[in-house]
Image (cartoon, helix red, strand yellow):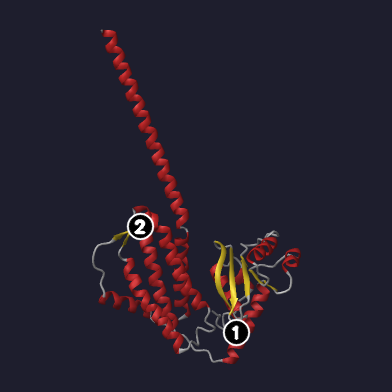
Amino acid sequence: MSEDSDKKVTYQDFYNIKLNKFYEFVTEVMHDFTFTVHRSIKEEENKRRIELWRSSKSEESAMVWIEIAKGDEHIDRYVSSDVLRTMNEEGLTKLFFFTNTDLEDDTRDILDGKNHYIFTPADIIETLEALDMKKMVSRPVKKRKTVKIASGYFAIRNYLKQHPPKGKKVFVNTSTLSDMCDHYVVMTRQILNDVDRIDDINNMSQELKDRFKRVQTKLLPELRKTLYYKFTDRFDYLAQCIYNIQESMIIYIGALVEMESEEELNNSRDRIEKELAVLKEIDGKLEEFYSEQMSKAESLSYRLLYISIGVIVFMAAFFGIMMLKK
């Protein structure tokens, strides 16, 4: 997704940048190389993302390594070794390495090689400026419109009015939460990846618009379905989280197709990414929950054991007193 001509990317934009925002720059650069994301290899929240990308023109594959540094931090010098080792494990020879900071000479020397492309802020800025110039020359830029109420809200309101929720809520077992959250993360990420593959969101063909309208239509019953979910008190927040993802995605697609403001697009995308981050934490939350349950069970077992011992001691003492009286 390109920046407007009056919002040029600067070095300051890379300082303490969020991974998701930086990923937008990466996607634009990679699309110029005619590569699209194929699968995730590894991710560390807001620090690192490693993916396998494939060329849309051939069977060629490449590893995309994204490394984010916070503040004035430098990239760990051991990262270069990790990159090469991971490439070897994945059987890849082509590399695109992106970072939001400058690299030290020894790190760059290790990463540098045939079919290895290294992008620091200077390289990214230069590439994005070239891409913006190419787009300005190749096609006119259509202006997006600002609306009081996003079209996605109307789509949701009309659908729920025609199909009001009925019946009882469905309880979701805690044992199924991990799979459930993973389902929504994968489904949502696939749609977002499809959006990121669009060369120019301001010049979408009617065929492409119709395709995303169909996606939006399919999401409406998914949103209605989330209204039936019921969780234990500990995980009750997931109901609102999953609903927010579906709602924001419908609004996001509506803004994309109907040429609504870039601000609406970005706000919707940010809401989606924020809620996805919550779903991705579910395994850790579940581990914490089960650990607490085990501790409670263990504590209860000890209390029952102490009570049993107390009863036995009391009965033995009572039996002893009765025997003395005889």
| Label 2 SS | loop
Task: Name the foreground residue: 17 vs 172.
Answer: 172
Residue 139 left/right relative to 301: right
Amino acid at circle 2: Asp
Dot 1, crowdedness within 10 Å: few (<14), some or many (≥20)?
Answer: some
Counting from the top left corner in percent of width and height, residue 245 is at: 41, 68
The reply to whether residue 190 is in sight is yes
- Between disc 1 and disc 2, the foreground one is 2
Amino acid at circle 1: Asp
Locate the N terminus and report the quarter of the image it occupies: bottom right
What residue sits 37% from the left and 67% below the top?
243
What residue sits 69% from the left and 59% below the top?
78
Q: Decide which of tag 1 and tag 2 comes sooner along the chain.
A: 1
Counting from the top left corner in percent of width and height, residue 136 is at: 58, 89
The reply to whether residue 260 is in sight is no
Task: Name the foreground residue: 138 vs 141.
Answer: 138
Disc number for residue 73: none
Locate the C terminus and report the quarter of the image it occupies: top left
Counting from the top left corner in percent of width and height, residue 45 is at: 54, 61
Name the residue that disc number 2 marks: 236
What residue sits 27% from the left and 12% below the top?
322
Q: CB under 8 Å between callouts 1 and 2? A: no
Name the residue that disc number 1 marks: 132
